[in-house]
């Protein structure tokens, strides 16, 4: 059957309420995307896995596009009047209505999400795809089930480093693990023990499910950061954001052995120099590696 798509532009203050109202009015799905062009990141210390960036309900774009999928018999004239009445007409800057022809939505979604390969050493694949013919170590991770599936630059930059370096028999800490994807990659690539910690209970639950699903519970310790005594590690990867990275600099230094590696991401390219300066006292830092507006930093403990 065909569907009606209602697209509304609003502000970051009203976007969540507008989304909830659309669901109350019968929308079968509601999504939030950028209408303004500023990068979305939370300066209060939230982890930035790609789905967290896309779904963070604590900070949205100054102009946010709210897109609702509705049944074709929905009375959009009445709905728009009700929405404007509830959140204020001035808070809906513009709207667009489109009739979407019927198509295989599930098939289209699956076609858009295919296996990702990193340095011919590891594959991250949705469950509906066939395993690689060359028996490449593979993580099964479905989009939508967790924070982080490898597609966002902050995640892929870290995976690339892990895939390009020897982790055999090493102890690794994934600090701010989100879905657990980096911890699982490290385990697949030969790490002896991996400690995956986060502050978000939803992320911790998702990570445990992913680790169990991929049969990596023997190699990965999963815990809330406040409930886990972390060892001194050979490698630490932290895909979080600039402010928490700066706040955690001394703690990270204590958790990495001399000549151990630190990999930092979740940093905008304009923040790279500031982060390099912050970590330069304890680490010999390499030149930044960029992907889109994001940066990966690597350093060796002095």
Image (tube, rainbow, N blue to C red):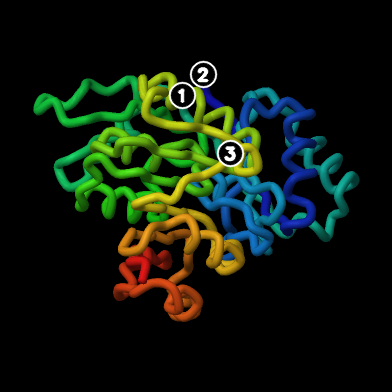
Mark 2 near mark 1, Cβ–Cβ under 8 Å?
yes
Q: What crowding class fits label 3: few (fewer than 14 Cα within 10 Å), some (14-19), or many (20 or more)?
A: few
| Along the line of sight, the residue nearer the viewer: 112 or 81 | 112
Up-down: is 65 above or below 128? below
Q: Position of residue 279 (x, y in %)?
A: 46, 73
Residue 116 visible within the image:
yes
Residue at the far left: name it: 134
Q: Quadrant of residue 246?
A: bottom right
Mark 1 or mark 2, which is nearer the start of the sequence? Answer: 2
Query: Which mark is on residue 228?
Result: 3
Query: Which mark is on residue 1?
Result: 2
Q: Position of residue 148 (x, y in %)?
A: 46, 41
Up-down: is 83 above or below 242? above
| Quarter of the rendering occupied by the C terminus | bottom left
Q: What residue did someone put label 1 on? A: 102
In whole angstroms, how far apart are the C-alphas of marks 3 and 1? 50 Å
| Along the line of sight, the residue nearer the viewer: 32 or 22 | 32
Mark 3 or mark 2, which is nearer the start of the sequence? Answer: 2
- Secondary element type, mark 3: loop
């Amino acid at each position: 059957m065909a569907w009606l798509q209602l697209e509304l532009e609003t502000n970051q203050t009203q976007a969540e309420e507008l989304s909830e109202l659309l669901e109350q009015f019968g929308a079968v799905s509601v999504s939030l995307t950028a209408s303004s062009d500023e990068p979305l990141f939370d300066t209060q210390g939230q982890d930035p896995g790609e789905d967290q960036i896309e779904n963070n309900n604590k900070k949205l774009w100054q102009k946010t596009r709210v897109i609702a999928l509705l049944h074709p018999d929905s009375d959009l004239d009445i709905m728009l009047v009700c929405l404007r009445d509830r959140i204020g007409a001035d808070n809906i800057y513009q709207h667009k209505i489109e009739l979407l022809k019927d198509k295989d939505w599930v098939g289209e979604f699956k076609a858009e999400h295919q296996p990702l390969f990193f340095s011919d050493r590891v594959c991250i694949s949705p469950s509906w795809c066939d395993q690689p013919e060359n028996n490449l170590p593979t993580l099964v991770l479905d989009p939508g089930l967790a924070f982080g599936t490898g597609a966002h630059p902050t995640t892929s930059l870290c995976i690339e480093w892990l895939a390009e370096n020897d982790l055999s028999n090493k102890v690794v800490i994934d600090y701010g693990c989100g879905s657990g994807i980096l911890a699982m990659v490290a385990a697949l690539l030969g790490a002896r023990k991996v400690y995956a910690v986060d502050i978000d209970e939803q992320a911790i639950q998702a990570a445990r499910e992913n680790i169990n699903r991929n049969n990596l519970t023997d190699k990965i310790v999963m815990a809330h950061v406040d409930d886990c005594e972390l060892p001194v590690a050979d490698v630490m990867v932290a895909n979080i954001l600039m402010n928490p990275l700066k706040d955690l600099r001394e703690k990270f230094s204590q958790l990495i052995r001399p000549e151990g590696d630190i990999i930092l991401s979740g940093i905008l390219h304009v923040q790279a120099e500031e982060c390099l300066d912050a970590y330069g006292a304890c680490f010999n830092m390499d030149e930044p590696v960029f992907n889109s507006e994001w940066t990966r930093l690597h350093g060796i403990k002095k």
